[in-house]
Structures are given as C-alpha cells and as structure tokens.
Amino acid sequence: MVMYRQIKYFFSAFVLFLSLSCAQQKTDVVFLAVEGAAHSDIEAIREFLEKDALFRVRVLQPGETELQAAGQPVVYWLHLPDSISYAQWMAAPSNLDFLKRLYGKAGILLSGYAALLPHKMGIESGRPEVRNIEIKDDWSFDQRGLQSWQGHVVFNDLFGGCFVWDAYENHRLTRIGYFGSRFPQEGRVVAVEKSFITIHPQNKLLIEYSKNGKGLLSLGAFVRFDIANHKRYKLEHLLRNSLRYLAGRLPAKGNTYWQEMSYTPHRFPVSKTRRPANIQKFNPQKSSGLVLQRNPAQNQFYDLAGRRILIMGHENGGVDEVWVHPFRVLRDFRTGLIIGDSVLWLNTLKPRIEIRPESITRYYETPLGSVKEIIFPSLHLPSMTVRYEFSGADSIRLLVRLRSDLRWMWPYDEYALGAVQYGYDADRDVLHIKDASGRFYCLVGSQSRPEMHLTGPFKTIEFDQNKLIGDTTSLNQVFHAVVYKIKRDLQITIAGSDQGLKDTGPAFRRMLAYSSVEYDRLADHYKRLTDRYLSFESPDKEWNALWKWTLVGIDRFFTHTPGLGSALVAGFATTARGWDGRHKISGRPGYAWYFGRDAEWSAFAIADYGDFGKVRRQLEFFQKFQDESGKIFHELSTSGVVHYDAADATPLYVILAAYYLRASGDLDFIRQSWPHIEKAMDYLYSTDTDGDGLIENTNEGHGWVEGGRLWGAHTTLYLAGLWARALQDAAELAGWLHYKDLKKQYLQDYNRAAEKLEKEFWNKRDSFFFYGLWPDGQMNDEKTVLPATMLYFNHLDPDKADKTLRYYGTNGFSTDWGVRILSSASPLFNPRGYHYGSVWPLFTGWAALAEYAYGRPLQGFTHITNNLYIKNHWALGFVEEVMNGARYQPSGVCPHQCWSETNIAHPAISGMLGWRPDALHNSAVLQPAVPPQWDSLAVKNLRVGQSRLGFRMIRKENETQFRFKLIQGPPVKIQLKPWFPLTTRLVTVRSDKDFQREGQLDEEGGLKQPLAFNLADEQNIVFGHRGGISMLPVLPRPSPGQSSNGYRIVEQKQIGRRLLVNLEGKRGTTAVFRLKAAKGLIESIDGVESITPERGNIFAIRVSFPEEKQEFCSKQIVIHISDTFYKKNK
C-alpha cells in the first residue's frame, strides 16, 4: 500500500505539472555549466530541471556567450556547489564578464558558492562571508530554511517561509551571506535563515538585486540535490518560484524585505486625529447573566478577549498586556489616584472584583471616595475600553500610565519591526504609536481633555511636585503618562491593528463613540452562546453555572488574524510566563497562537455542543495552511510563521472531518474538502517507512510527548491508535463519496492496524499497554494515560480496557484534581515534569472519555468534575493548562487553556450523555449515565444536522422518566440506552406513543438493547424498575497547595448477590463514602465502620484504611444484597 501511495503521489504531481504547463507558457532556463566540473550536485539539479514540466532547459557550455534558439523570457542559473567549482568558474575571466553583461538583460539565479559573485561582479560592495555549521540528524529538530519578513513572491504557497533542508545524516552545512549586524549594501534581503521554531534575522541568505527591471537572486545556502533531504520537495518549490519570478512569470506584488533598522524610538508628526461627532453616554442594557466574585481580589490572572483583541492582567489592578494579533499594542497599564503630591496606585489596594464573560469590574474604596473600574473589549473590533466611575468628593485627579513596544509575535524577535515611533495629539488627547512601516499601529485616547501628559522613550514616568518626570531608557519602547481631573467618569479607549491607521482609526472611533453598544454586543454574544448551545440543568447549581463558563472559556479562543483567518488558539498567559523563545523580550503570550492538535482535540467538543460553523471554519483553516505534502501544521503563530513538526495533527484532522460530518451532515463540505483529506491520508501512508502498517514518529515529529524522559519512540501507541481511527474514518468518508476502492483499502488497513494494536502493544506481564516502540524494535513498557485515547475510540478488547482503566482510578494516576500522564510509582515521575508527572486537564478528560466508553461512569464523572472545580481558584471561571502532580497548584504556562476547557465539555457530552449524532441518517445514539446523586437532569440544544432537541430526566425509586422534545428541524431517530445503577431490574418500558416492552441491563448497568424511536415532536418514555445500588462519585474539594487525600472508588462490580467495591485512601485514616440504594436492598456491608442513613436513599459509610508502608492503600467493601430481593428478581 505504501508503494501504491508513493506512485499515486508522484503521478498526481506529474499530472499537476502537465496541467500547469498547458495553462501557462514554459519558462526557458539556461543552466550555466562549469568547465572541468562534473559534480553530482550539478548533475542532479540539471535532472530536476529537465524533468520539471514548467521549464524548458538548455545548458550553456563554457565559452558560449549567446543563447541560441531560446524563447522568451529567459532565466540563467549558475550553481557552484563548493569552493572547488567556484575556483574553476573564476579561473576563466570571461565567465565573470559574461555575468556582468547579462545582469540587467535577463533574470539570474546564483546559488551555493555562486552567492559570492555579486560582489565580484561589482554590483554589491559588501563582501559576503562563508560560514560553516555542523548539523546533527535529529528528526525535525535539525531542519533549516528561509523566512521572509512579511512575504515575498518566491514563497508563494509556502506561507512566507519554509524549511527546505533536513538531511538524513550528520553533516557540515555551508552558508554564504551576511551575518550579525552586516547587511548587503546594494542588495535587498528577501529571507533570513530559520531553524526549528526559531528565526535567525542575523543570518541573511537570500539576497535580491535588480537592474532595468531584471532581477538577480543570490541564495547562499541549502541548494544541494546530491544529498538526501527530507525537505527536497520544499526546496524544489522555492527554486521553481524563484526561477519563474526572475522570468517575470510571478508578479512582484506585495514583496517585503528585511531592512537595516534603527531601534531608537522617536517622535513623528501627527495630523489632527479624527474623532466621532458625538459620544454616547455609557449605559449598557445587556448582560451575559454570568458573574463570579472575589473579595478581596487576589494576585490571580484574568483575561478578556474579542475575536481580534486579547486583554490580560491580574485581579488586583491594571492591565498587564493587550495583544491585537499579531502584536502587543501596549503593556503595564496602571492607574493611580493623585492625593496631594503623591500617587495612590489602585493596584496596591484590595478591590472587590466581579468577573463576567464580557468584562472585569473592580470596586475600590479610597480616601477620596469610591472608584469603579470596568474593562471590556469589542467582540469584533481590535479595540477596548477602560472606564472609571467616581462617587465621593467633587472631583479627583487620575494618573494613567502605560508603555508600548509593538512586540511582534514570536518567532520574530523584538527588533523585527524597528524603532517604535510615537506622536501625541494634545488637542484630541490621542496617542499615536506605530512601527517604521506604518502597518503596526496603536491609538490611545479618551473623551476628556487632560491636565498634563508626557510621552517618550522612558523606562518609567513618575509624578513629583505636580509634574510628570521621565526616566530615559535604551529600550525600544514608548512610555506615556497623562493626568485627568474628573468629576464623575472617564473613558479611555485603546485600538490597534497591523493593517495601519486605516483599520485602527475606525475601530478607535467606534469604541469611543459607542462603548455601550460594543459592551451590549459582547454581553449579548455570551448570553446567546449559553442559551443557543447545549446546556445542563441539574440539581447541582454550581455545576450548571460552571458549565456555562466552560462554553465561554472555549468560545473565547476563536481568534481572527488579518491575512490568516479565524481559528482556535491554544492558551492565554502574559509573556512573563513560559519560555521566552531565546529573546531578550518575549513575544510569546502563553500559547495564544494557532495549534494543530490543540484545535483538533478541542473541536470535538465544539461539534458536541453544536457550534458546527466554528468546526467547519477550523477545518478550512487547516486546509488553507496544509503543507504540500499533505501534512497539517503543529504551530502557526499569528505573525504568520508555520511549523509542521507534529506527527499527530494530520490523523486528527481526518478524524475531525469525519466527526464533523456525523454531527452536521455537511456532506457538500466534505466533498469539497476531499482533495485535502486524501492528500493527508497519502502523506500518512508515506510515513510508514518500515511497512508494518503503522505511521511513525521518526522524522515526522512528536505526538504525544514533545520531550523529556518519555521522548524517542519510533511509533507511540497514541499515534498508532490515531492512525487506526483515521483509517476507519477515512473509509467512512470515502464511502459517502462513493470511492469504493479507497473505502475497501482503508478498511483493510484499519483491520491490520487495529490487530497490531491489540496484539503487539499489549504488555501481558503488566496487563497494560506499552507506551510505544523504540527505534531498536524494543517496547517501552512505561504505563501512561495515553491508551485512554484508544479506549475512547473503542479500538480495544473490553477485558484489556478494564485492566487498563483500573489503573487510572487509583492514586498512582489520579489525584484529587485530575490524572497524571504517568504513575507516581514510576521512576520517571516528577510532579512538575511537563511530560512525565504533571496533571493535565486534557489527560483527565481523556481518562473520563475512556471510563464512560467502558462502563465506569463514577470515575468518569469524578474526573470531569476535577477539571470543573479548577475554575473556582486561579483564573476565575477558567481552567489551567497544567497542574502539579503532587500538590494542587498550577504548573504550566497558561492559566486559561483551550483544551482544558474542552475536556470538560467533550467527556460531559460524549461520555456522560453518551451523545453520538449521525446526521446523514437523521439519527443519534443517547446513552446517558447520569450520576446517581442527580434525581433530575434537563438537557437542551442537542444538535444533529439541522435538528435540535432536548430532554428531561426525572428519577424516582421505582421509575425513571425521559421527556423528549424536538425543538427544531426534521424528526430524529433516537436510540436510547440509559445507564442504571447495578442490581437494577427493569420491569417495563412504556411510552405515550403506544409501545411497551421489557428490558435487560448489561453488566455495567446499561440497557442491553437500545430503545429506538422516532422523535417528531414530543415523547415520554418511562422505565419501570426495582432495586438499584451505586456508590456516589467522590468529588474532592482540595484547597490550593494541598496534597491529595486520595479517597477513590477504583471500581464497583456485581457478582451474584454481592456488590464488590474497591476503594483507596490515605493510610491510617478514616473517610466517609456515600452510596445510594433502593429501600430494603442492603442486607449488610462488610469492611465498614458504620452506616448512617441520610436524605432519601443515600447512606454515609465510614471506612478505615490500615497503616501500611505506602501512602495510599486499598480496601474492599462487600455489599450484600438482601435475600428477598435477590430471589424475587433473579
């Protein structure tokens, strides 16, 4: 199959070239031969040109000075692979004379050591350097390439930059160009060097010259065709573009260049700023209906976001950073109250705060009266408002100060935009800030005229003796301070854009004039979000409210960047946290840029709760930036730099496409997307280099683990499991599109992959799945949480799944706040280890999905709630990226992470509700496993295709009622299979639609055969039953900094008239667990200290754990079912 795919790939490429050649004239390329040189590299390049359908090639032999019988236009290419060929070329003076005469008459490409020739020709006065570096073959971590500043035509379809070099072995790489602070004097820098997740602006390697409209490109690195190179296809693409550009086939529209810049901030003249004619009074009318409060505020993170703007800070006061993608418009916004000759900074006080989806409000009590501060963004504009309302004395004086460095997002460095420029329109109180190009622009102003202001390249500005005094700095930043005297209110408006003043100005004026309208639009958006999409109404009001915050937390990550599009970013944090990208001033706001696998795992949940439009746009975004190999990106910064260094993003893309189809029924989109899907599958097949039927991590990238002590598998179980699911889903998609042969092939390969997963990755000795296959053919037997993904996808034998999941329920994996990647008993365990000991809400959600899939709803609900309760502590309303593996405290970069949020929603909907839509058949499976402590549950806005429905469950002692309602759309065929507590005996199943039948339960408490019915309007279904007993899920409430108490329900199973419950707890302690049982059902319980009846049919049972060497120990209790009930219902 691999060979078939490779042949198919090359055939497709050949057909593409033929079609291109028919659609456009061929370009004549004259390849300049070197006398006495028979270098394999030169021969390989000639072969490349001769086989490319876009070019007509002729070799110009030494001594020839004219091109005979060639069409127009013509490009000349001289490639000198090493110093020997360079010396041979230079040995004949006529060669250089020929190039001099040719320059300005035809396009010229100089590569390799030929990059030395512009200086020799006299068209460049700056002498280039030759530098060598040693590169070790290290998967994708050793790849090299080129990056433009903001685009150039030679990078057409290469997204502004690309990796073109990834050799198969250790080697020395020669680069010829301008290094350090040196720039070419006459040439323009098209591109600089890039390496793994790093741009090297000091290494200028692709230089352009022009005369009489004819260009010359000098490329001093990476052009070697005689060395095996994983990125050969990218190198060919770049060269193809370069040759066509030099021939005039590709217009030079939008070309940008790296420039030698000043980094000293300076003032620029500002014309009178346009302001709105009228400014409406701030009087918002709408609210999202959600609010979280803290009194007093803590030094905890908060964020606010629209589609284009991100605001971040700490609860105590101020704004730490504001990003308008792709750059930071300002930072360190602080406000102080002037009292006499001193300043009382508001962030030194302890305000009461209210966090809403649309805003943060702070209430300060000061010696002069009360100050209310409201901060909110626009939903769609790149603008925001900071508003102050005062009550107390006649008036107060407020000092507002901030700084701006226009930091362009990583991986560009802090110098990429040159000197910050600033100007202040005192008449209109508007600060203008821009970069040298004028594209990156910021406006800050208010509706009030200030008393005084000071702006300049300062480190800070202080208020002293009624003056503003600046402390100068060498930093490339502008500091701004302004004093207002206000009686009742002050509104400060901030706007920014990388589209210049033409975009920033209207956004500024709109927000300044209509702040109430913008506030209402944002509040209404969140109200509609929680009303329109899936909602829960349970007896647990906290759970219900935090669910709504989950929808808010997910939706906030959908971000628009001009020139790129709209999609999910991964996580929010200020640049003060995390890796700085090896830059003096970090340009990494958490993970607030686009990620492949993050968005894919997150989009499953978005499809679950019914926002199909966003999932489709996410898929379109992946397709827009799909590599020509078919691979899906891992990271795409909002500054436009893309990396393809993950192995799992591509299979997840295929899986997501199928998931979207089943939820939405949007077959037209899948049909349009099929070329991208098939291309992705072809790429995946190509990565199976050893022919074992599994795709590989080797040379393709990480997935899951990115580094650390688990790193290095040739193929991980996680990746192999994704491949199996991608094959299964691709077969389904191919079937819908009537590609019968492809469907058959995908299914055959799925069966082969699934069999290998079951047999070769099962560790019989430990009754667990291997982590992965080492390059030497040995298996890594480390136990991890990663098999949970395969369990969720239902690839595995139930017995093996049961043995695996038992581990996840123990204290080795589970803490009181979630699930570790590996067991605390592992020698690799480090509670702060990013990939070898910490707790990720993502892993916790994966475990919950697997637990629901294999009949462990108590553990699943515990793990969902672990994630949910994190919202109550650090960033109010939101879930951390990573938690410490030993103490309840954050351990990651981002206080608010997208897939942490979605791993509440995804297991709640796919797991707890068991919701599996099949829109193309107008049907859905519903397998609700409602936790036993909830006697009722209402669910609204379950979506399948064009239909929306809801249901209400009411649970009584002897019956459970489901009331279904079709809210909109065509009828839906429902297959209902609810979970019931163990020992439950179904008596009848009846409906108001005139059917009645008996039902039986399986061993986990689910209905053996689903109840199928057609929901056309409303329908009531009642299950009559007797008995039923279940432990209640343990829902820990750890305090920040606390270690786990470790009380767990590992599993519960019924064997005859006994219910065996395996518990864990801290050694030498006593804990209270709870169970719910029908009246008269329990005869006795072994292994408990006491049994105390509580409300309803709930009992508190006290369990003591013995003193043992290990911190946590096991205890089994046995619940005996009454003889009367057992005989009657056997």
Image (cartoon, rainbow, N blue to C red):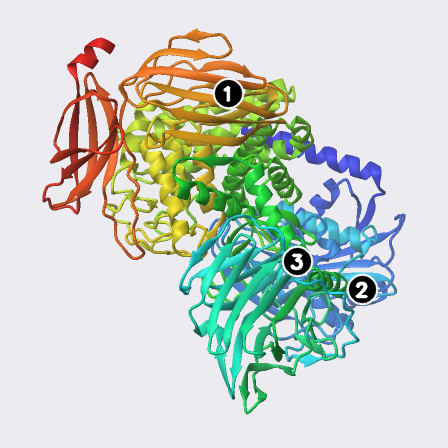
Q: Quadrant of the C terminus?
A: top left
Say what amino acid the circle numbered 3 marks: Ser
Q: Residue at x 82, y 58 (%)?
A: 107
Q: Kindly identify which residue carries mark 2.
A: 99
Is 861 on the left-hand or right-hand side of 824? right
Q: Kindly identify which residue carries mark 3.
A: 516
Q: Earlier in the sequence, mark 3 or mark 2?
A: 2
Q: Quadrant of the N terminus?
A: top right
Please state the horizontal and vertical placement of residue 202, each as a whole percent of the image: 60, 69
Say what amino acid the circle numbered 2 marks: Leu
Please state the horizontal and vertical placement of residue 81, each as a whole percent of the image: 64, 58
Number of the front mark, 3 or 2: 3
> Tag 2's secondary structure?
helix
Q: Earlier in the sequence, mark 1 or mark 2?
A: 2
Is label 3 in contact with label 1 (beta carbons under 8 Å)? no
Q: Kindly identify which residue carries mark 1.
A: 748
Q: Earlier in the sequence, mark 3 or mark 1?
A: 3
Please state the horizontal and vertical placement of residue 841, each as a whole percent of the image: 40, 45
